[in-house]
Image (cartoon, rainbow, N blue to C red):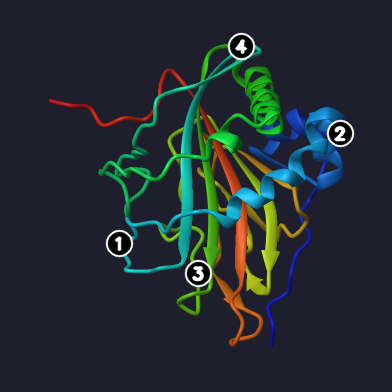
């Protein structure tokens, strides 16, 4: 018997900040995301999807899987200024990522056309303003991850590390698209208690925004709808952190 699919508890743009403050996360549908970003930025969003067809395989999966493709980029946001920083490793401590923490992961960089795309830059500015409204205006250190999880191995794991925090201030998960898959349910839990919610993002350019200091999150594995056809799930994940990037402390 197939598992039930729960609709996302979406909010309007004017409710985004209050929901982040009240429950530690908020979800917006594609129409609300477009309204929140403004027409100029929103018009270019669907042009970004083509870049997800050129993602190299993740060479760091410790479970031996072949199901994840990704690219990575880093930026600094200061008010209305977006500055790309030289390509750098993605690093997390073991306390946040028990599976892949504690090592430098040098993923291929974002394509220059994606990193410099006006709609991506506008999206980052909107996220920076939101986090400044939540935490207070300051400089934000931003990491951008382009992910494709596929069913090459029969099953794909969007979060092989399980329910986790990322060690940042806010995590944004934009759904770009799902193709011939089932599963991929988003789950968000109170970091200090038992309460949580589960739902499935399906609409292209819908958004899950998470206060990483208050909640933990995960996405359940995906499987192909038809075993003879490969499926995939594309997302854009953006993290924002005050005080600098997460980096290994050198002796």
Quadrant of the frame with the N terminus? bottom right
Figure check: 56 above or below 209: below
Q: Are marks 2 and 3 in contact (CB under 8 Å)?
A: no
Helix, strand or loop status at disc 3: loop
How far across and how far down the image is residue 185, in percent?
63, 63
Whether residue 234 sits left or right of residue 169 in the image: it is right
Q: Residue at x 68, y 18 (%)?
A: 133
Q: CA distance from mark 3 to mark 4?
A: 38 Å
Counting residues from the start of the chain, the first of labels 4 and 1 encountered is 1
Callout 1 crowding tier (Cα within 10 Å): few <14, some 14–19, many ≥20: few
Callout 2 crowding tier (Cα within 10 Å): few <14, some 14–19, many ≥20: few
Q: Residue at x 33, y 57 (%)?
A: 59
Q: Which mark is residue 156?
A: 3
Callout 4 crowding tier (Cα within 10 Å): few <14, some 14–19, many ≥20: some
Between 180 and 91, which is closer to the camera in this rendering?
180
Q: Is residue 14 shown to the viewer in this render?
A: no
How far across and how far down the image is residue 78, in percent?
57, 12
Judging by the rendered image, the residue that carries numbered circle 2 is 35
Disc number lying in front (2 or 4): 2
Helix, strand or loop status at disc 2: helix
Q: Are marks 1 and 2 in contact (CB under 8 Å)?
A: no
Q: CA distance from mark 2 to mark 4?
A: 23 Å
Counting residues from the start of the chain, the first of labels 2 and 3 encountered is 2
Figure check: 204 above or below 223: above
Q: Is residue 2 shown to the viewer in this render?
A: yes
Q: Are marks 4 and 1 in contact (CB under 8 Å)?
A: no
How far across and how far down the image is residue 247, in percent?
31, 30
Helix, strand or loop status at disc 4: loop
Q: Which mark is residue 62?
A: 1
Q: Are marks 2 and 4 in contact (CB under 8 Å)?
A: no
Counting residues from the start of the chain, the first of labels 2 and 4 encountered is 2
Judging by the rendered image, the residue that carries numbered circle 4 is 137
């Amino acid at each position: 018997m197939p598992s039930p699919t729960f609709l996302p508890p979406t909010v309007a743009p004017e409710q985004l900040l209050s929901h982040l403050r009240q429950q530690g996360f908020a979800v917006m549908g594609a129409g609300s995301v477009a309204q929140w970003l403004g027409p100029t930025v929103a018009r270019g969003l669907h042009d970004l999807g083509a870049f997800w067809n050129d993602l190299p395989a993740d060479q760091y999966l410790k479970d031996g899987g072949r199901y994840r493709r990704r690219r990575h980029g880093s930026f600094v946001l200061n008010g209305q200024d977006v500055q790309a920083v030289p390509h750098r490793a993605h690093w997390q401590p073991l306390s946040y990522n028990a599976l892949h923490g504690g090592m430098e992961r040098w993923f291929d960089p974002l394509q220059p056309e994606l990193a410099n795309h006006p709609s991506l830059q506008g999206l980052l500015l909107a996220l920076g303003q939101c986090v400044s409204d939540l935490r207070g205006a300051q400089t934000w250190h931003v990491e951008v991850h382009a992910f494709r999880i596929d069913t090459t191995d029969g099953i794909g794991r969007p979060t092989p590390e399980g329910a986790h925090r990322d060690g940042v201030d806010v995590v944004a998960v934009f759904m770009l698209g799902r193709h011939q898959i089932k599963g991929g349910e988003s789950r968000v839990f109170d970091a200090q208690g038992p309460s949580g919610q589960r739902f499935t993002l399906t609409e292209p350019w819908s958004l899950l925004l998470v206060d990483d200091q208050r909640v933990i999150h995960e996405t359940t594995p995906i499987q192909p709808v038809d075993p003879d056809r490969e499926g995939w799930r594309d997302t854009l994940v953006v993290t924002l952190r005050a005080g600098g990037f997460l980096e290994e402390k050198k002796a």
